[in-house]
Amino acid sequence: MGGVEDDEPPSKRVKVTSIDSGGISNSLYLRQRACTHTLSDSMARLLATEGDDEVVGSKGIIKKVELVRVIAEALYSLGYSKSGACLEEESGIPFHAPEIDFFMHHILEGQWDESVAVLHKFGVTDETIVKLASLAIFEQKFSELLDDGKVMDALETLRTEITPLCVNYKRVRELSSLVLSPSQNLLDGTSSKGSKLESRKILLDKLRKLLPPKVIVPEKRLVQLVEQALVLQKDACKFHNSSVGKMSLLADHQCGRDHIPTQTLQVLQEHEDEILVLQFSHNGKYLASSSGDHLVIIWEVLDAGQVLLKHRLYGHQKSVSCISWSPDDKQLLTCGGELVRRWDVTLGECLYIYEKSGLGLVSCAWAPDGKSVFSGVTDKSIIMWDLEGKELECWRRQRTLRNADLGITSNTKELITVCKETVVLLFGWESKSERFIEEDQIITSFSLSEDGKFLLLSLWNEELHLWNIDGSPRLVSKYKGHKRSRFVLQSCFGGLDHAFISSGSEDSQVYIWHRLSGELILTLAGHTGAVNCVSWNPANPHMLASASDDRTIRIWGLNQVNVNNNGRHSNGVHHCNGGS
Amino acid sequence: MGRVFAVTLEGKIYSCKHCGTHLALDDDIVSKSFHSRHGKAYLFSKVANVTLGEKEERMMMTGSHIVVDIFCVQCGSIVGWKYETAREKSQKYKEGKSVLERFKISGPDGSNYWVSHGAHFGGSDADDV
């Protein structure tokens, strides 16, 4: 490969001036070669090794040449240039040709014509890439000439070098307009008063991304591949429920069941009748439950994990079938006996009662801004009040059936209801848009994920269907195994990153599925009646609450024995199952 | 018990005599000439708000059938049966359909039916045609 100082001894490399590691990757540093080999055949050798068929690994899918080059890039990225050079020598596989080094040098020194010349010697077969790269280089030249005030030279460049390459004539016009108003700048928002070096480094990064990986190994490629593998391991881990921080490369990641709540830590027995609805507050500090005895209880979750009774909310004449926490968790809405009550959580007092004369209210939800309240009505309409009870809006015509579920998304500003037996309506209350989800089976209840992107439907035929409602609604997974033939069972999302789906069941157990794989991973036994509701603490992935016809609420947590013994000697204290 | 899930029907409704839960629509009646132990019974193409019992082979007036008893989802009282499989070809039309005993349901006008002495005590089922 002629044209570039061929006779310069390889040990004396041309050094690039004043590079700081911020703007440019280590691996492209000109490096001291601890070894020697002639320049001229290095590119040829590089291309020759491409044809080498040697593979590595049991599956025969990894090319040895590529593996070595990627490792070399990793060594250079980490700053181990001697090792990198040694690897190249010992393997006989060049990391990349020295033309790249010269190319880099020319760019950073502003030797535009030389850099374009070297560009053509890379052996890139795709003409478009060569064009685009040359174009980027000339545009840089053009803008630097303009900045230096060499307008005539800039115009010369535009005419003779840029225009012949340009596929995009609009661009040529844009550039020529810059000649007239040189105060504007081209360079991706960087100030022309800033260092030229900075913008040249940006150009170099851009060129690096443009050139094919065979010519320049993408930056930090090995790290990228390793991260891909780790992410896949994490996704495949069915019990993954705790932040693992840094994952180990030395063994495949696999959480045991120890990170999922499996043990009853507390049994709460304050209710005197079957428990119908259960819901943690957004901050995980409170739990609200409603029961057949018409009572709603607010529980407080202490930092240590213990759950204590905070308030008994008297007032409803019938059982409450819908609970909604305000966005700031300071107030609570409860819907029961055809009206809605708003409560202060700290004081445990009823602040307001919402009613619609002649009609009944069946569901309730807070607006995301906390300033208004929505409710489903027995005449199938949805009503919106401000906090003082002034009716702001009423949407009629088949908006909701009598299901006690009213979902609300803050990002898309949609209300979610079951509008027909097998159809869910997503109604934009400001935009008046309507989207629908249609199922084959009757929908008994639903639950919305905290980020408002997923909807979990509980169907008549004992299946849970997960829909992605971010964008066009699409069915993502189905979960089966639990028993449902008579009751409305509450289901929920839970765990770290909503990795799990949980539901109650008429066989007295709590069911937990792995969300991504759909696999049933756990059933928790303990209740002695149908489990009507489950709620996973949004702030604590290790706490799950369930409530049942047996009149109790169970708080589930990690299996204490295993957690304590994990890798450490037991301190002799014996923990028994069943908690306190 | 927990919150029972029951759908609300619209039209001329037959509901459970004990608790008023909607069970079927007049439009879905296939035949009114069925009988049960308690007298008259109607065959419906579909019913709502029922749970199913265990499959059983039963000898009926028109032959042997595999049926399941059906119960009101709210109060649990037995309201009739559903045909799963009919042994005779001529009876295949019953498969998937349900019989509600007139004695167990309130009619669309709220009327009830009392077991009369003349009721057919011999057996259940009926011919139609």
Image (spheres, grey):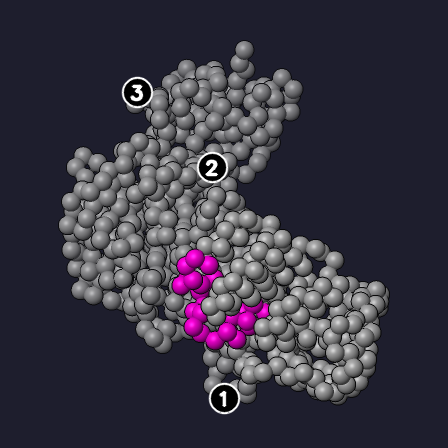
**Residue drawn at the location 38% of the way across and 18% of the way down:** B116
Residue A572 position in % (x across, y down): 50, 88
Amino acid tagged 1: Asn
Q: Nearer the viewer, mark 3 or mark 1?
A: 1
Q: Report the residue that reaches farthest toward the front.
A: A152
Q: Could you say which quadrant of the image residue B115 lies in?
A: top left
B89, A537: nearer the viewer:
A537
Do dots 3 and 1 share one subunit? no
Label drawn at residue B109:
3
Packing grade of label 3 (10 A; few <14, some 14-19, many >=20) is few
Q: Which mark is residue A47?
A: none
Tag 3–tag 1 contact (CB < 8 Å): no
Quadrant assignment for the C terminus of chain A: bottom left
Give the magenta range: A179-204
Q: Which quadrant would residue A8 be assigned to in this image? A: bottom right
Q: Is residue B22 above or below residue A492?
A: above
Query: Which quadrant would the N terminus of chain A be assigned to in this image?
Result: bottom right
Q: What is the x, y in percent for residue A213?
A: 69, 65
How far apart in space, not on screen, are marks 2 and 1 (Cα)? 56 Å
Which residue is label 2 attached to?
Answer: A438
Callout 2 environment at 10 Å: few (<14), some (14 to 19), or many (20+)? Answer: some
Residue A75, given in percent of the width and then of the height, sits at 67, 80
Real-space CA distance between mark 3 and mark 1, rounded to the nearest whole angstrom: 74 Å
Along the polypeptide, which appears first: circle 2 or circle 1?
Answer: 2
Q: Is disc 2 in contact with disc 3, using a CB cutoff of under 8 Å?
A: no
Same chain under badges 2 and 1? The reply is yes
Q: Is residue A169 visible?
A: yes
